[in-house]
């Protein structure tokens, strides 16, 4: 017998029926989202449409009204906070708009720290951090500089290295190219979209930038609290 639909285990993220409200407004109103290993998904929507809120819900950092979220095949909505924090640390890498690195630490330590906090031994953490920075194109000169003095593009590459060091099943980015100039935006986007193939992870990016979103395998639009395929945008049917 041939099974035509993928089994749930192939999805690194499977979210169904997400509902989230703030006073006077329903930000998520039955949103569904799936990301498979090796695949990229982008979600667009205007500023204030709830993209960051969607990510915070998916990370388990904001409490849903209802819905179900499985990450790496495990339902995070049923987890207690300590268990959820460990699962998030072990399964998800995050990249934010302004990199959110520790400015007083050099890039190598910023990256290695994420592995140390996950219980990795010092030697492995630093070797892996070094290898990742090499692979992601952060040169030796930038590595010896205080993170605060790096360019925006370099900072985002360090942030991607930090997000990858614990070999997450899912990588998420909230406007990860939003603070970059055009050249860096393009090269950081190319780096991000190469990751699902190279690292067999799922990639989920939320952005208001359609030119970035169009490079993803799947482009969804957040509209009135639901997620729809972007092709339908503008249809008057
Ligand atoms: N916890 C909250 N309390 C009140 N308002 C919130 C909260 N979280 C988000 N909002 C509001 O919800 C809307 C969506 O925010 P956000 O998810 O940041 O949108 P986006 O990332 O698409 O710009 C905004 O109007 C924001 O001010
Ligand atoms: Mg946002």
Image: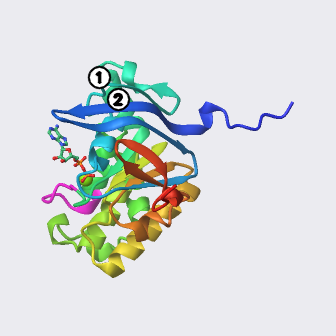
Residue indicated by mark 1 = 82
Q: Position of residue 194 (x, y in %)?
A: 52, 63
Mark 1: is the Cβ under 8 angstroms from ligand 1?
no
Assign the magenta stretch its main secondary structure.
loop
Q: Is residue 41 above or below residue 55?
A: below
Residue 26 location (% of width, % of height): 27, 36
Q: Residue at x 17, y 57 (%)?
A: 105
Do labels 2 and 1 touch, CB within 8 Å? yes
Q: Which of 34 and 28 is in front in this view?
A: 28
Q: Visible in this render: residue 83?
A: yes
Q: Is residue 209 above or below residue 117?
A: below
Left or right side of 120 for 144 = left
Left or right side of 218 for 204: left
| Rendered location of residue 109, percent (x, y) | 25, 55
Q: Can residue 135 be seen in the rendering of this structure?
A: no
Q: Distance between the residues labelled 2 and 1?
A: 6 Å
Identified at 28% across, 22% down, the residue is 81
Q: Residue furthest left?
A: 104
At a point 27% along the width and 42% down the height, the residue shown is 53
Q: Give the magenta range.
A: 100-108
**Can you give x and y, in whole percent of width and height, for residue 135 in the image?**
46, 66
Residue receiving disc 2: 86
Residue displayed at 28% across by 55% down: 96
Quadrant where the image shows the N terminus: top right
Question: Magenta segment: does it hold 63?
Answer: no
Is 3 rendered above or below residue 54? Answer: above
Crowding at label 1, few (<14), some or many (≥20) Cα neighbours within 10 Å?
Answer: few
């Amino acid at each position: 017998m041939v099974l035509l639909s993928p089994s749930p285990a192939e999805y690194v993220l499977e979210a169904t029926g997400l509902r989230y409200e703030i006073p006077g407004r329903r930000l998520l109103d039955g949103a569904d989202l799936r990301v498979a290993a090796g695949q990229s998904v982008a979600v667009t929507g205007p500023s204030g449409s709830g993209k960051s809120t969607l990510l915070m819900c998916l990370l388990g950092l904001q409490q849903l009204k209802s819905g179900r979220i499985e990450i790496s095949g495990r339902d995070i909505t049923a987890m207690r906070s300590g268990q959820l924090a460990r699962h998030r640390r072990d399964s998800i890498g995050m990249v934010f708009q302004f990199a959110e690195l520790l400015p007083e630490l050099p890039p190598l330590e910023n990256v290695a720290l994420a592995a140390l906090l996950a219980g990795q031994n010092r030697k492995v953490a630093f070797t892996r951090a070094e290898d990742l920075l090499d692979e992601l194109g952060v040169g030796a000169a930038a590595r010896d500089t205080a993170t605060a003095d790096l360019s925006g593009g370099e900072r985002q590459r360090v942030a991607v290295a930090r997000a990858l060091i614990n070999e997450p099943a899912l990588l998420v980015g909230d406007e990860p190219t939003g603070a970059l100039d055009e050249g860096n935006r393009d090269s950081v986007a190319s780096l991000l979209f190469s990751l699902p193939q190279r690292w067999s992870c799922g990639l989920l990016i939320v952005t208001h930038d359609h030119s970035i979103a169009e490079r993803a395998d799947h482009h969804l639009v957040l509209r009135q609290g639901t997620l729809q395929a972007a092709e339908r945008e503008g249809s008057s049917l």
